[in-house]
Image (cartoon, rainbow, N blue to C red):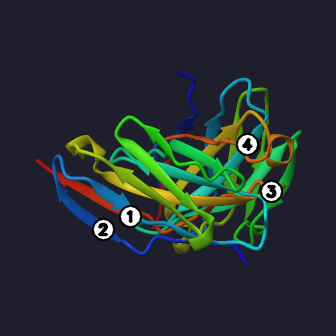
Amino acid sequence: AQKVTQAQTEISVVEKEDVTLDCVYETRDTTYYLFWYKQPPSGELVFLIRRNSFDEQNEISGRYSWNFQKSTSSFNFTITASQVVDSAVYFCALSEANTDKLIFGTGTRLQVFP
Amino acid sequence: EPEVTQTPSHQVTQMGQEVILRCVPISNHLYFYWYRQILGQKVEFLVSFYNNEISEKSEIFDDQFSVERPDGSNFTLKIRSTKLEDSAMYFCASSEVGAGISGANVLTFGAGSRLTVL
């Protein structure tokens, strides 16, 4: 069965600190896709990244980086030098091949204080 | 940047009433979705729609729910006889391709329609 676990319900940091949001997934498929979405206070879901199961290369985009490790079924997200604007709920999600369905984790609320 | 627009942003209704939530997907997208998020909980898949028919639906999407693409631009979610537990944020999303074509589709979500059932 597919499942996404985000064990951290809420994280609070002070601006400029680095923060890592954890995501652990379960799937029996060998082909699958992992996503991170951001939900700012305004409520919309903003796509951040998609990885496929065959590409374990870590990715960096500005202050954001993602660490995909199949051995531990994890797809962690790190924000470097956090800013107040990073305050949001972050969702990790899983999609298996040939299904339209995204399975979301329960989300991690990140609060960045000035 | 193209976006998915949803109306209304907030709707309050009485239990038992019918509700229609509307969405305008991105114009060149062919796949459409509804998800919901009960307050403070995770986002849950309801249904996907392609070529004027449902391609996949979850166990949540029972006979109370229906979707329609009444014209070339709108995509609607109808909830018949609303219940208290239908109170949630409903997100519409669209994607250019479906999961079977390029692997996993990247969904663009709208800002959501908050439904409150009293």
SS for dot 1: strand
SS for dot 3: loop
| Nearest to the observer: residue A77 or residue B87 | A77
* Left/right of residue B49 with respect to residue B82 in the rendered view: right
Q: Residues within 10 Å of mark 3 (few under 14, many from 20)?
A: some
Q: Nearer the viewer, mark 3 or mark 1?
A: 3
| Residue B85: % across, % down | 54, 73
Disc 2 marks which residue? A10
Location of residue A98 by image quarter: bottom right
- Does the CB distance between marks 2 and 1 fall below 8 Å? yes
Mark-to-mark CA distance, 2 and 1:
5 Å
Given the image, what chain letter belongs to the residue carrying mark 1? Answer: A
| Residue A27 visible somewhere in the drawing | yes
SS for dot 4: strand
Disc 4 marks which residue? B32
Q: Sequence order check: which comes first, mark 2 or mark 3?
A: 2
Q: Residues within 10 Å of mark 2 (few under 14, many from 20)?
A: few
| Nearest to the observer: residue B7 or residue A8 | A8
Q: Residues within 10 Å of mark 4 (few under 14, many from 20)?
A: many
Q: Residue at x 40, y 67 (%)?
A: B40
Q: Nearer the viewer, mark 2 or mark 3?
A: 3
